[in-house]
Amino acid sequence: MPQLAIAGGTPVRSRPFHAWPLQTREQVEAVAQVIQSGRWSRHLLRDPDGLVATGDPASPWQTDLFEREVAEFIGVSHALAVSSGTVAMDLVMRALGIGPGDEVIVPAYASIGTATCVLESNAIPVFADIDPHTYTIAPKAIARCITPRTRAIVVCHVGGRICDMDVIGRLGDERGLAVVEDARHAMGSRRADGRAAGTFGRASAFSFGPSSILTAGEGGLIVTSDPVLDQQVRVLHDHGLELVECQPRNVAFGTSARMTELQAALLRAQLPRLEGLNERRHANVKYFYEAIQLIGGLEMTTPPEPEGFRCYRDVILRYEPGAFAGAHRNRFVRALQAEGIPCSCGYDEPIYATPLFREQRFLKGSCPVNCCRVGKAPNFAHYKRTCPNAERAARDEAVWFPHRLFVGPQSDVDDILYAIHKLEEHADELAAED
Ligand SMILES: Cc1ncc(COP(=O)(O)O)c(C=O)c1O
């Protein structure tokens, strides 16, 4: 009689976990008010009749208010709301003047947008390996990637874990390189000294996609404490428009990446709950962490720190097959899913190994493949050798749990633990069908 659900046994959990996104009355009312107002988009320079908008101090844009509130929450002086996290990264690269022939160091283990922002600027992403325990970009690997062509370092706070920003910041300063934070997983992540993700780089990007801690379904944010950079991305995100002698003029090669007023209102309505939800997740993750330490073969990439406060967009475990009779990580994940526990393998290949990079499916005739400033196409195949930690994390080790599993009561965490114990107890059955 099989015990494991993957082999036909009874699943540990048949009830759904906490739903995400949360649906609250405040959000419905906030969006309804915007709909009724008829002001659905902060067109920076023109109103719907094509007239230059002067703004109405009595009814400020939701987008302006959100930018002010979220900047204060993060601890930066400037924030610009945009249409997605990916576009946020693209605009930062453009504003930094990254271009053909430039190299930008990016983590090998992150989402595709962490590297495509470099391609967007016709520059070359150079992949650095990650730390084997935290899965964030390894400072030593960054140092090895620096060449005379390097212009910037992009870091990604994977799962909400803040990278080693002191060391990376010093490296950037010493070598004259801009540091950019892909903070899309890290809204509200703070270190023990109180500094939040988004405050370390020249500029940082956040996402408000469906699985984000703050979500409008879609959306993004650029934050910086550099007023010049803020002005540049502001111009770029709205067709390169700027007021010249009170008239909107296209002064730069921009794009259309405005956030709508509906999104901004939705996000504003969520802000007051953000800290409380992060604290609830943190308490549940701490409980999970303490129990996980007693189980062999599982290590958390972001252990909760007593003084520090981390947000968890994902809880990521490092899986060691020896403790589960040699069953591969993919089998472990499928078996947990069958037990009714939502989880995944996360990024299941390093960015350089995706078909986009492996087969160099870039824009025809453009950089970085056909670049007169570079001479020859970059070789993305060699990263398999230089990024062994990213290879292992992606293909064999990482197990990702979405944050919504840690928003509910502690009994939800007990179910996850019970399912893991069950796999451990029946490890032979788990491995047998691998
Ligand atoms: C690290 C990282 N970068 C980029 C993105 C994509 O952001 P968006 O969907 O807002 O463009 C995500 C999505 O969550 C992400 O996790």
Image (cartoon, rainbow, N blue to C red):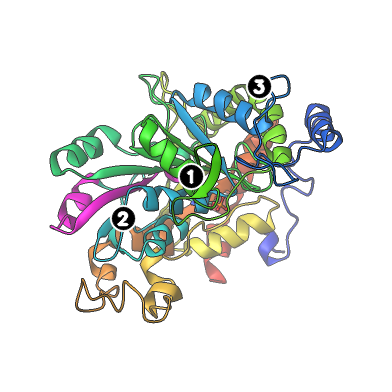
The foreground one among 402 and 11 is: 402
Crowding at mark 2 (Cα within 10 Å: few <14, some 14-19, many 20+)? many
Q: Nearer the viewer, mark 3 or mark 1?
A: 1
Magenta segment = 139-158
Which badge, 3 or 2, is on the more N-terminal residue? 2
Where is residue 319 shown, x and y percent of the image? Answer: 44, 53
Residue 272 marker:
3
* Mark 1, secondary structure of its residue: helix
Residue at 43% of width from left, 71% of height from top?
354
Mark 1 CB lies closer than 8 A to ligand 1: no
Name the residue type under label 2: Ile
Where is residue 60 shown, x and y percent of the image? Answer: 68, 25
User: Label 1: which residue?
Assistant: 235
In the displayed structure image, the side of residue 250 where residue 142 appears, left or right: left
Q: Is residue 151 above or below residue 17?
A: below
The foreground one among 173 and 371 is: 371
Question: Is residue 79 found inside the magenta-colored segment of the image?
Answer: no
Residue 294 visible in the snapshot: no
Name the residue type under label 1: Val
Which badge, 1 or 2, is on the more N-terminal residue? 2
Question: Is residue 153 found inside the magenta-colored segment of the image?
Answer: yes
Residue 68 visible in the snapshot: yes
Q: Nearer the viewer, mark 3 or mark 2?
A: 2
User: Label 2: which residue?
Assistant: 98
Q: Quadrant of residue 266?
A: top right
